[in-house]
């Protein structure tokens, strides 16, 4: 993303807590300066452990982490100069907002006058200037969250880590805070490593997303890349909504392949991660890329289907159909002018392009 | 029906027609079926309140009868001593007119002689004697002698006869004392409790140095309690921290060890220390045979023994409140402090320790207040100069039969405890307000 090489570098990092199971398996990850990178994954996937190792609260069992050209191996957390926002904010309850923000500056022996100006600037940045004298318990969740962000930024750290900071907020506030954090990142040109299990949050804020599963990065790409071109069945399933069709590869020709779907039907798909002819595969298809009753010959994949269920969601109608022996196949029909409303039980045809249907691993 | 003008009752249309009518009639509140809503609420709540009262009543009565009334009686006893007044009604009246100079005149002696005669008949002269004896040693036997003599007197002059029976009646001090004791309400016990007394002229003065006891005992009680509290804090805080930070399994096992001593009766633990601290006991055996000491040292009946045993007994009381507060402190606070640049000790001191203050305040105050009332442990393992105020209360009440002194000492202890409790409440109350 930026010139000058990686700012943070994980080199062959492994971590085990019990000596039997690797929570993080051989992690290699480069983060550029000024980047907003999100570690996304289900709980237990190793993303939080990775963050804690970067912060210095967990020690890698193997490998090394480098920050700004300096190995972190023997650097205790308080000397790493990394700001961190915790899941429950971790504001100090016995100190006022102001004192919370002054804490990292006092530790660094900043002069009193400087502390005052920097605390004020940080509070203004998150629009909480008037709450300086309050205690954290007197603030709402969203306000506490902003204080936590301000505290992690007030000492101009090299790097900012955020561990599911929005998890405790309600949906509306969460979406608002996502934008605020995104704007702060753009404005201040800081490097952020963000951990979440919420894919929408990851897509909203990140420059790049590392999808974790079983202690490994499954895919590391930009949000659009991740959604449009997932490289594994896990990523396709975890990011956004996804239709899965299981089958077996019967023919390969270049980038495409022919897949015999379990419930019947021969699908032409993009061969992304298939072992070869005869190997099992999962076909991944986004609901909004499926067309209902397309013109004959317009798409290579065209199958008869039956409408099972309609769910009205305002901007679109989720339509569940059964096709190729799979009855959990979802099509999103935009609720726009002139769109056709189907009835449950109606017979239709569904079709999709070869490029929109990705043949992935069988998991 | 049409909705009324929304001006005076902007929401009335939401409540329906009937409500609109009654709301229009009522000027004080909302009415339902002509009954004010507040009254309906009270009726509905009455049953619930009665049930609550019924549930609380047995315990409440028990506390009033077994705890509240005795305390009131005790407080009262410390200033109320009616025996002399009851037994010498004539003398009390006669002495009221006495100017306090010289000896009283013949009529006072006559009154006293008649009173003593009655008391002798009722076999209660010793009660007067006992009270006089508190302030004038030897007065008890002298009064019994005088009462016997008075019983035989038929006619005056009584003055010579009484002085002949015992020369103390010829002394001015005896009469000032008698005049004081004929008043049922007396500050005497409180004065004695802080080492003050009346001199021969009825003025308050400090008791001579050799006889002063209670000020020293109060100071000692406070000192030992403070020492024990400080020791339990120093020993308990690190352990509480360990328990709060260990994995739950290990912590629970360790906690059982703490609770085991907590669940053991105080008497059993004190007796255990009584055995351990003996000059021929296990501790001395160990020190002696390992060569740490050349000869056996005195452990039992010492201040050291008292404080050791009390510290051991009180440790869980200090530890457990601290532990429970520590359990509630999120580990992410210290992590946050570390990530913000604080070293391990600074993070602990600035972020963790202040949050344990409510627990420290609660634990220390509990221990301190309990220590103030210690009785069994000091009397079993302490020496004569290690006895706390409770020992003297027990002594006066059970052995000496001096309820006045016992009550006065007890009252001072109670008031001291209440003051501490008030301070604690204020401190912890403020602390809580800040935290929530």
Image (cartoon, rainbow, N blue to C red):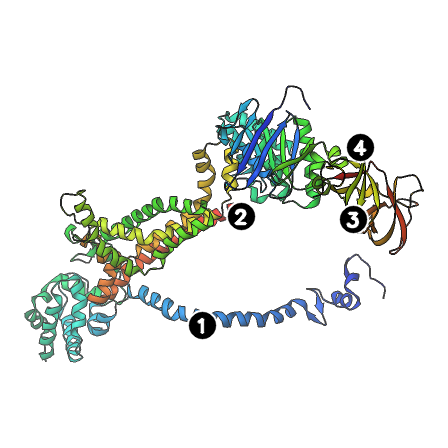
Q: Which mark's residue is nearer the viewer, 4 or 2?
A: 4
- Vertical placement of B385 versus A254: above or below? below
Q: Is residue B262 left or right of residue A253?
A: left
Q: Are marks 2 and 1 in contact (CB under 8 Å)?
A: no
Provide the residue designation for mark 3: A262
Mark toward the start of the polypeptide (2 vs 1) = 1
Q: Total label count?
A: 4
For disc 1, the marked residue is B58
Of marks 4 and 1, the one in the foreground: 4
Q: Residues within 10 Å of mark 2 (few under 14, many from 20)?
A: few
Label 4 sits on residue: A255
- Write down the residue under mark 2: B436
Mark 4 → mark 3, Cα distance in angstroms: 22 Å
Q: Are marks 4 and 1 on the same chain?
A: no
Q: CA distance from mark 3 to mark 1?
A: 75 Å
Q: Which chain does tag 2 point to?
A: B
Instruction: Establish if A242 lies above or below B106.
Output: above
In space, the residues marked 4 and 2 are separated at their CA atoms by: 62 Å
Residue B15 appears at what percent x and percent y? 76, 64
Are the residues at dot 4 and dot 1 in contact (C-beta closer than 8 Å)? no
Q: Is residue A18 visible?
A: yes
Look at the numbered disc 4 and give the secondary structure of its residue: loop
User: Dot 1: what SS?
Assistant: helix
Give the crowd class for mark 3: few <14, some 14-19, many >=20 residues within 10 Å: some
Q: Is residue B207 left or right of residue B349?
A: left
Report if the CB atoms under discs 4 and 2 are less than 8 Å apart.
no
């Amino acid at each position: 993303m930026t010139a000058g090489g990686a700012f943070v570098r994980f080199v062959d990092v492994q971590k085990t807590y019990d000596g039997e199971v690797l929570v993080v398996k051989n992690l290699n990850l480069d983060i550029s300066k000024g980047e907003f990178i999100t570690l996304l994954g289900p709980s237990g996937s190793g993303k939080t452990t990775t963050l804690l190792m970067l912060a210095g609260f967990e020690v890698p069992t193997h490998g090394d982490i480098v920050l700004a050209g300096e190995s972190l191996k023997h650097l205790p957390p308080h000397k790493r100069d990394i700001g961190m926002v915790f899941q429950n904010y971790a504001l100090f309850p016995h100190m006022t907002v102001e004192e919370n923000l002054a804490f990292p500056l006092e530790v660094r022996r900043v002069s009193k006058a400087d502390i005052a100006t920097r605390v004020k600037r940080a509070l203004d940045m998150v629009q909480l200037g008037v709450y300086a004298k309050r205690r954290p318990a007197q603030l709402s969740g969203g306000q506490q969250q902003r204080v936590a962000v301000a505290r992690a930024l007030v000492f101009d750290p090299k790097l900012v880590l955020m561990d599911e900071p929005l998890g405790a907020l309600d949906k509306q506030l969460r979406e608002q805070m996502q934008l605020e954090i995104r704007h702060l990142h753009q404005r201040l040109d800081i490097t952020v490593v963000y951990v979440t299990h919420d894919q929408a949050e990851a897509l909203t804020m990140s420059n790049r997303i590392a999808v974790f599963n079983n202690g490994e990065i499954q895919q590391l790409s930009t949000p659009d890349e991740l959604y449009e071109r997932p490289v594994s069945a896990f990523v396709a399933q975890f990011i956004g909504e996804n239709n899965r069709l299981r089958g077996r590869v019967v023919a390969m020709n270049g980038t495409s392949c022919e897949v015999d779907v379990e419930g019947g039907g021969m699908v032409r798909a993009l061969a992304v991660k298939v072992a070869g002819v005869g190997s099992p595969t999962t076909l991944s298809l986004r609901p909004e890329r499926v067309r209902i009753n397309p013109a004959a010959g317009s798409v290579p994949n065209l199958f008869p289907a039956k409408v099972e269920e309609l769910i009205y969601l305002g901007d679109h109608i989720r339509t569940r159909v059964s096709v190729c022996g799979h009855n959990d196949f979802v099509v999103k029909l935009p609720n726009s002018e002139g769109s056709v409303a189907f009835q449950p039980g109606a017979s239709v045809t569904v079709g999709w392009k070869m490029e929109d249907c990705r043949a992935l691993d069988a998991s | 029906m049409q909705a009324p003008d929304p001006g005076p009752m902007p929401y009335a249309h939401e409540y329906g027609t009937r409500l609109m009518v009654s709301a229009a009639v009522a000027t004080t509140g909302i009415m339902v079926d002509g009954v004010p809503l507040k009254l309906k609420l009270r009726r509905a709540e009455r049953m619930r309140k009665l049930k609550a009262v019924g549930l609380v009543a047995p315990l409440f009565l028990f506390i009033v009868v077994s705890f509240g009334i005795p305390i009131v009686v005790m407080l009262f006893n410390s200033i109320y001593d009616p025996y002399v007044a009851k037994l010498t009604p004539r003398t009390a009246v006669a002495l009221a007119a006495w100017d306090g100079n010289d000896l009283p005149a013949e009529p006072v002696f006559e009154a006293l002689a008649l009173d003593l005669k009655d008391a002798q008949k009722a076999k209660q002269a010793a009660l007067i004697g006992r009270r006089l004896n508190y302030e004038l040693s030897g007065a008890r036997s002298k009064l019994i002698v005088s009462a016997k003599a008075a019983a035989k007197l038929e006619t005056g002059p009584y003055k010579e006869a009484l002085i002949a029976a015992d020369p103390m009646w010829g002394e001015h001090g005896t009469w000032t004392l008698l005049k004081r004791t004929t008043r049922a309400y007396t500050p005497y016990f409180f004065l004695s409790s802080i080492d003050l007394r009346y001199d021969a002229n009825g003025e308050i003065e400090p008791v001579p140095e050799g006889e002063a006891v209670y000020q020293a005992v109060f100071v000692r009680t406070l000192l030992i309690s403070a020492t024990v509290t400080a020791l339990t804090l120093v020993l308990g805080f690190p352990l509480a921290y360990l328990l709060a930070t260990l994995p739950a399994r290990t912590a629970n096992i360790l906690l059982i060890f703490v609770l085991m001593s907590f669940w053991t009766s105080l008497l059993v633990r004190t007796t255990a220390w009584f055995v351990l601290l003996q000059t021929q006991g296990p501790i001395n055996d160990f020190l002696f045979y390992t060569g740490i000491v050349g000869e056996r040292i005195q452990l039992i009946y010492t201040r050291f023994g008292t404080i050791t045993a009390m510290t051991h007994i009180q440790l869980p009381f200090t530890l457990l409140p601290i532990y429970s507060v520590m359990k509630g402190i999120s580990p992410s606070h210290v992590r946050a402090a570390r990530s913000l640049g604080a070293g391990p000790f600074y993070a602990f001191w600035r972020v963790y320790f202040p949050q344990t203050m409510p627990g420290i305040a609660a634990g220390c105050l509990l221990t301190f207040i309990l220590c103030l009332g210690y009785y069994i442990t000091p009397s079993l393992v302490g020496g004569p100069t290690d006895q706390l105020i409770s020992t003297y209360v027990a002594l006066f009440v059970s052995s000496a039969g001096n309820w006045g002194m016992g009550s006065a000492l007890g009252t001072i202890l109670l008031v001291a405890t209440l003051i501490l409790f008030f301070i604690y409440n204020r401190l912890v109350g403020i602390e809580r307000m800040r935290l929530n």
